[in-house]
Image: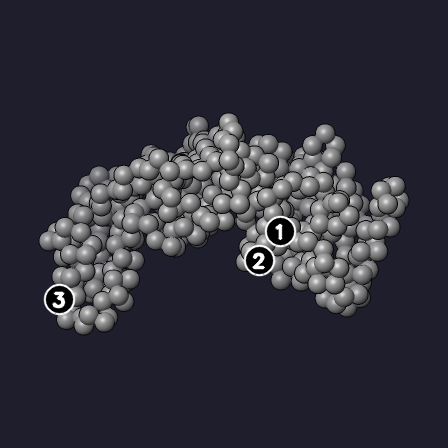
């Protein structure tokens, strides 16, 4: 463990800062404001071989009793992880692992190459016994915190949590709020995504990776005619039915009421992947399901999409065809970084809405809302001769 070159402590009005110099300025590296403990840790790094030795020196300096060392270690590790993620600390990376899993997610084959400890448990139900030629390969690679690709490119997305830059053959994706998840290089054809992570590996990194993998998976899924809809889903009369709404509207409450009163299985509590294959709308199981913990690994025919809105009374209104497509598209979280991606999302939404039942349900959160919607679905199936 050592400090990387070209970062120096300088004081501005007696406040210590780590500032870049030389090549680091050319790379547009940012500086870091330090508190007194951060300054002390930086000064002790050259005399310590590893984190355990640094912890001992820091505990001695502050005369920390043994029972409080765990708290000190947590704070120290968080600070060192941030140093590493910002390219200020060089730690020997863990040796690459040959571990990996082959999965079928959303009906698509995905190979995840990663150390065993970085494979989220949510993926395990989606693992395949026999590997197939993957639609996408995802690699998790150790990094010392230095950039794995040159800076530059066209900025497509910039938020507090995400930055996406388009380069000639790839997208460079940064995660500013995740100290250990440095970046991802995503090939434009969607066949390969490489994540660079800063060891040592800890639980927050596992959660960050699980959600970051969702982003690149949905990018690839869009290239195979699939669209992710923020919605809860259930299985009724041999079909999947989606209940879509903004967060807090009550979509999970509604599907849970179906389960409570009619024992209808819930397929996914938060997110669903849809497609239209040879004129047949489908839903495909994925592991991402919000806080519900409910997901399904199978594909099912899609009966319809019900767009919820809170109301004291229960009423269904059929939107016009163009509005149906727009309402479904508005509930999508699939990437739309470019005009081509938006066009593909729009194509999928149009194909699905043209092939299944779409309605707006104004409803309360009582059993009567479920009974009302169940009757409407049954009436629709009778009209098309399915029951």
Local crowd at mark 3 within 10 Å, few (<14), some, or many (≥20)?
Answer: few
**74, 12: nearer the viewer:** 74
Q: Position of residue 257 (x, y in %)?
A: 71, 62
Q: What residue would you read off at disc 3?
A: 60
Q: Nearer the viewer, mark 1 or mark 3?
A: 1
Q: Earlier in the sequence, mark 1 or mark 2?
A: 1
Quadrant where the C terminus is found in the figure: top right
Which residue matches tag 1? 268
| Side (left or right) of 34 relative to 276 | left
Viewer-nearest of labels 3 and 2? 2
Distance CA(mark 1)–CA(mark 2): 8 Å
The residue nearer to you, when weighing 30 against 57, is: 57
Q: Residue at x 71, y 49 (%)?
A: 235
Compared to residue 341, the image places residue 242 above or below, namely below
Taking the spot 18% from the left edge, 48% from the top edge, the residue there is 1
Separation of residues labelled 3 and 2 (CA atoms): 45 Å
Total numbered circles: 3
Q: Is residue 311 left or right of residue 23?
A: right
Which badge, 3 or 2, comes first in the chain's sequence? 3
| 323 is higher (above) or lower (below) than 112 | below
**Mark 1–mark 3 distance (CA, rounded to whole Å):** 51 Å
Q: Secondary structure at mark 1?
A: strand
The 10 Å Cα crowd at callout 1, few under 14, some 14 to 19, many 20 or more, is many
The residue located at (59%, 44%) in the rendering is 297
Secondary structure type for disc 2? loop
Q: Nearer the viewer, residue 169 or 120?
A: 120
Q: Are marks 1 and 2 in contact (CB under 8 Å)?
A: yes
Q: Which residue is mark 2?
A: 292
Q: Are marks 1 and 3 in contact (CB under 8 Å)?
A: no
List x then y, in percent, for residue 59: 16, 66
Q: Secondary structure at mark 3?
A: helix
């Amino acid at each position: 463990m050592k400090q990387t070159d070209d970062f120096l402590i300088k004081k501005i009005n007696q406040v210590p800062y780590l500032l870049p110099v030389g090549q680091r300025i050319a790379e547009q590296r940012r500086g870091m404001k330090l508190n007194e403990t951060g300054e002390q840790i930086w000064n002790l790094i050259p005399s310590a071989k590893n984190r355990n030795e640094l912890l001992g020196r820091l505990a001695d300096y502050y005369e920390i009793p043994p029972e409080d060392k765990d708290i000190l270690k947590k704070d120290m590790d968080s600070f060192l992880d941030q140093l590493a993620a910002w390219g200020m600390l060089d730690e020997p990376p863990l040796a690459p692992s040959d571990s990996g899993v082959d999965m079928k997610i959303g009906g698509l084959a995905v190979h995840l190459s990663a150390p065993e400890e970085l494979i989220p448990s949510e993926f395990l139900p989606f693992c395949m016994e026999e590997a197939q030629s993957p639609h996408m390969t995802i690699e998790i690679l150790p990094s010392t915190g230095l950039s794995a690709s040159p800076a530059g490119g066209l900025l497509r997305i910039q938020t507090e949590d995400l930055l996406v830059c388009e380069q000639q053959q790839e997208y460079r994706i940064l995660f500013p709020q995740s100290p250990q998840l440095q970046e991802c290089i995503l090939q434009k054809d969607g066949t390969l995504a490489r994540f660079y992570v800063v060891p040592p590996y800890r639980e927050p990194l596992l959660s960050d990776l699980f959600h970051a993998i969702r982003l690149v998976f949905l990018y690839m899924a869009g290239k195979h005619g699939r669209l992710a809809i923020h919605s809860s889903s259930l299985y009724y009369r041999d079909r999947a039915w989606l209940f879509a709404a903004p967060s807090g509207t009550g979509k999970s409450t509604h599907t849970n009421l179906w389960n409570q009163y009619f024992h209808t299985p819930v397929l996914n509590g938060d997110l669903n992947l849809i497609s239209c294959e040879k004129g047949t709308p489908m839903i495909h199981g994925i592991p991402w399901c919000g806080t519900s913990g409910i997901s399904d690994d199978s594909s099912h025919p899609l009966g319809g999409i019900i767009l919820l809105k809170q109301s004291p009374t229960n009423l269904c209104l059929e939107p016009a065809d163009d509005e149906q497509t727009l309402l479904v598209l508005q509930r999508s979280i699939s990437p739309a970084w470019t005009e081509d991606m938006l066009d593909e999302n729009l194509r999928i939404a149009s194909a699905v809405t043209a092939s299944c039942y779409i309605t707006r349900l104004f409803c309360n959160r009582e059993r009567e809302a479920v009974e009302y919607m169940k009757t409407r679905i049954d009436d629709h199936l009778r009209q098309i001769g399915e029951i």
